[in-house]
Amino acid sequence: MRRGYEKVCMAAAVLAMSLSLSACGMDSLVDALGTSGKSQETAGETQEATVEFQGAAAESQEASGETQEAPEESQGAAPDSQEVPERGENAPLHPLVQEQYLSDYDDSFRQLAYTEYASVGIRCADEKYAPLEAVLDRYNQDRKAEAERIHGELLEAAKADSEMSEHFYRYENVDSVDILRADEQVFSFVRENYDYMGGAHGETSFFCANLDAETGEELRLSDVISHEDAFWKYVEDELAKEYASQDLLLPGWEEQVQRRAADSEGGGPFVLSQSGVRVIFVPYELGPYALGAVTVEVPYQASEVGFNDVYVPDEGQSVWKLDPYEELDLDVDGDGREETIRYEEQTAGDGLWTSYVLTISSGEKTVRTVSAQGECDYGITRGYVMAKPAGGFVFYAECRSDNDWRYLSAIDLTELWTGNEEITPAMYYDAFYDHVPVSAESFYVSTRGYLLSTVSISREHCVGQDGLPTPLQEDYEFDSFAPTVKRDVPGIDPDSAQARTIPAGSQVEAVSTDEESYVIFRMTDSGELVKVEIDGAEWPHTIDGVDIQEYFEGLIFAG
């Protein structure tokens, strides 16, 4: 049990479809694509919000971020001797979440308004997911437009209100997105929105998206289960056991659950996770604000609910997202009893250099390890627990360094629990960035390439036998880079090794690279691949002895 709250590819066609985002709380919008804080519902009431997509042609999304050179200590490489575990039959989708920011200040550099939102996508996989890509692309377009509108409203209100108080604190609207499932059957995510426009605290709302992975169509609760009465009885029983038994819920909470049950046919305030169907209740809906969001998950093993086998995952969960101070219960040592895993950050006196404490505990035993001061530089962006192929678990902390350079700090949880309290975290100098891992057998991590240009490059990985990320491919893939060809570029066919030339003026896309000696380009018009050898041993990098910047326009080398 988990306690606590828990580039989009080019689409092949224009598709007419709709995506319904179910508002999981009282603080919802009429159109479900954003929240301005001005459409408040009565506490406990839930409104379904639907967005009609009249057609969407998915466009390639370029990853944003500073292209700065990595610090010297963050130059690492994947282990060459690592044995790659056998992969499952069904490769997962590879979801991405890209954060976007809007911010405005007054003349004295006091921040007035801040808006944060996220685009959601999948890394190019199979053509069968083109409908899903199109739906997500349309969602991203509408979410961006809504965020810009909200930010404009916040800024106007902040300009007026900030003049009335020297203690004014910025007005903000902040999204966070959790991908809860991404496989051949289902793509689902939760968008949590926090809206603040003064007062003791802001308001929180949740929006849930449950999509058929192949068609992109919205899934209703009735598509997933056949016995809704049994489903909501399970939810009510769990609330009574976990919360009402400790007098944590407000009087009349049962009626609020029944109200949610009555609204469920319209799409419902639910989301499909890898382990079950999750229902989220916002603050004030069942209990006081201090209780926070209340989440109940109905597991797929609950036979009385009548789950539709089409939407039950084929494989068990192998990745668990873990936030600071949150607790995750797993059987770390395989003895049939669960242990509790948690971590917290520790900051040095200067407030910059950060370490973390990882703790595993049971009723009789507690072990912990502390990373070295500065081990995670400016803090942990995300934490995950992943299953190892031969049993056991490993903890990955994604750490942030200078210029938003990121790297992974890994601790073998099973080794720690079985007695090695002095375990030292292992470092891996690629990181997740925009990628969201959903399977320990297949996930992408990224770094910054420098052979052709300072750009984001990625490789597919799995959790290796030693718990570290192990590459499943030799070459890196360019996330998105299409330089302009200024003069004829000499190259070869990557299969036959016959001479090829990229003519000046051609439209090309950088596809892959070994980051040592070559880059493979795709000709946009013909789809032909051309391998171009690049000498990156010294600066400037050259092709046949000529500076590569003589061949391409749009190259950036940050250092």
Image (cartoon, grey):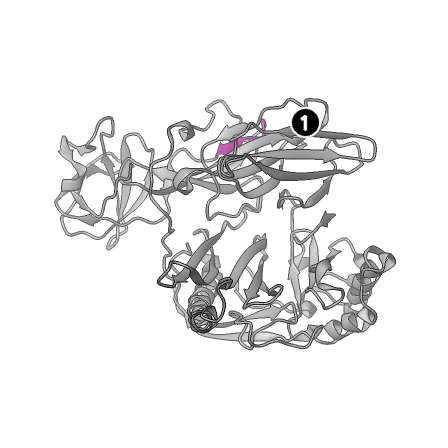
Q: Residue 281: within the magenta? A: no
Image location of residue 271, percent across then percent down = 64, 61
Question: Which kind of residue does numbered mark 1 sit on?
Answer: Leu
Residue located beneath label 1 in the image: 416
Could you say which quadrant of the image residue 22 lies in?
A: bottom right
Residue at image position (66%, 31%) is 413
526 or 519: nearer the viewer: 519
Magenta residues, start to end = 465-471
Residue pictured at 53% horizontal, 26% vertical:
83
Q: Is residue 515 above or below residue 182?
A: above
Q: Relative to residue 124, is residue 327 drawn left or right?
A: right
Secondary structure of the residue carrying tag 1 is helix
Residue 310 image point, x, y percent:
65, 59
Which one is in front, 81 or 287?
A: 287
Point out residue 63 in the picture as x, y percentages from the top left corner: 38, 51
Q: Is residue 75 above or below residue 520?
A: above
